[in-house]
Amino acid sequence: MAEAAAGFLEQLKSCIVWSWTYLWTVWFFLVLFLVYILRVPLKINDNLSTVSMFLNTLTPKFYVALTGTSSLISGLILIFEWWYFRKYGTSFIEQVSVSHLRPLLGGVDNNSSNNSNSSNGDSDSNRQSVSECKVWRNPLNLFRGAEYNRYTWVTGREPLTYYDMNLSAQDHQTFFTCDSDHLRPADAIMQKAWRERNPQARISAAHEALEINECATAYILLAEEEATTIAEAEKLFKQALKAGDGCYRRSQQLQHHGSQYEAQHRRDTNVLVYIKRRLAMCARRLGRTREAVKMMRDLMKEFPLLSMFNIHENLLEALLELQAYADVQAVLAKYDDISLPKSATICYTAALLKARAVSDKFSPEAASRRGLSTAEMNAVEAIHRAVEFNPHVPKYLLEMKSLILPPEHILKRGDSEAIAYAFFHLAHWKRVEGALNLLHCTWEGTFRMIPYPLEKGHLFYPYPICTETADRELLPSFHEVSVYPKKELPFFILFTAGLCSFTAMLALLTHQFPELMGVFAKAFLSTLFAPLNFVMEKVESILPSSLWHQLTRI
């Protein structure tokens, strides 16, 4: 009985909701009927005649002023809408209507629908939500003192944003500090130094820590921020390696004596890996590429579980510089796996290797006549795969957009990752004859295979919608962020643009040809109201003229 009563109440509620949904149509027709019935006592016909006489007495100057004012107002709305759309990526009018007017008009709450959808979501949607817009440390990030600061000295522009540098400070505190640092004076000073916002205060704290003893993290800070050349940074990193290796060996022997020693050993491991990786990058910058490759291979062999540093991407770039394509393929075979997170370096390097096999003899005219060979098809599919993963990269490789210094953090599949990849790998693509030509001829074909709207991906998960916002935080303001997919102009911008143009044209025509526009306006209004007059005549022929008097008697 209880279930039957609950079902009846739900059915009654749904009927009431359905009736209220369509009640406005009944109300609309009721208002029209009442206006028709009350047309005589309300003197609607007389009022309409008075209005028409008033409009006939108006001069063309009034209409010019009216249409000109309408054009001005719609133009101001258009300018504001365009500015709001460029800054926030949405229409102000649409946002206000959805946020404020829709609930007042009985719109459906999005939260309830989202909750119901999430309860029915499958495992794919859950996997897609796993850190699609997670910000990663750039494995090829530059040196702040020797490279970023030199750019600032030359151009006067800041290549790093506050958000990016704040993320780096958090990384340094995570990798280079532990809970037992307060027991050692030098480490306690460095623990505070990594939290400092002022670069000079950090550098002064590092020098203060070095006065106490040989502190590896102090050398790291000075190498990153105070050294003005790569050679100076390498010298400081070598001193850091000497101090860090000693701390690592001591903590390795004590790591099983308690959680405190284990945390200290984990910190010393991070410090040692960071130093060796940066030393390998210094060797790569200074032209000692083979030495850098050996250092990276040894580091990956010594610490195989520390994949968070993505050292294999540094190794791929160095091997490409040596043109050791067989070794590059071996690294890709290990890391281009379905269970591992992808990156632009992985996808585009795989595409480059396959393009290298056919690009020197590739001709779009010949391919259109005879069709693509198996090797060419594999190369094109690899390019399509890479472009789907990160669609921003081709414009930088083809030099359709200007490059800037890469940030210290990147967003995978975003514009920041595209800049970081192209900054170091553009030379490798240029070195392979015909590779950029093949990319130019085939990369746009990727978008014909991706469903639109982007509800489903083709080879990867759907492209995340949060990349633009995160990239604007990571990249400097003077850089024009690449956006994919391109946002269509909101309806209200198009509407206000059309309204502004139409009213401006009416104002101009009314000013130039007042009599002709008057005739045209009367003809337009008579045509517009012709159906209404026809309906009124039919209604009057059906209903008696004394209906209102009969209703008053009742």
Image (cartoon, grey):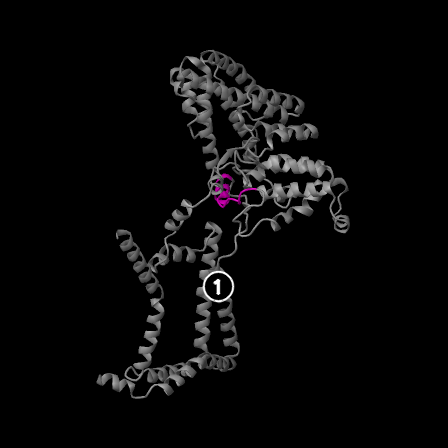
Q: Residue furthest front?
A: 1
Is residue 13 toward the left or the right of residue 313 in the image? Answer: left
Q: Who's the residue at 43% across and 17% down the image?
A: 262
| Residue 272: image location, x then y, percent | 52, 19
Is residue 51 toward the left or the right of residue 485 in the image? Answer: left
Density class for disc 1 (Cα within 10 Å; few <14, some 14-19, many ≥20) is: few
Instruction: Report helix, strand or loop for mark 1.
Output: helix
In this view, 340 is above or below 470:
above
In this view, 551 is above or below 297:
below
Q: Which residues are magenta?
A: 460-474
**Residue 467 magenta-highlighted:** yes
Q: Who's the residue at 23% across and 84% down the image?
A: 552
Whether residue 105 is visible here, answered yes or no, is yes
Q: Quadrant of the C terminus?
A: bottom left
Residue placed most toward the observer, 150 or 419: 419
Whether residue 233 is visible here, answered yes or no, is no
Is residue 115 toward the left or the right of residue 361 in the image? Answer: left
| Residue 13: image location, x then y, percent | 30, 59
Query: Looking at numbered disc 1 in the image, what kind of residue is underneath it?
Result: Phe
Residue placed most toward the observer, 420 or 553: 553
Q: Which residue, given by chain and number where applicable, does mark 1 sit on? A: 495
| Residue 261: image location, x then y, percent | 42, 15
In this view, 287 is above or below 132:
above
Is residue 548 toward the left or the right of residue 167 in the image? Answer: left
Q: Who's the residue at 52% across and 49% down the image?
A: 455
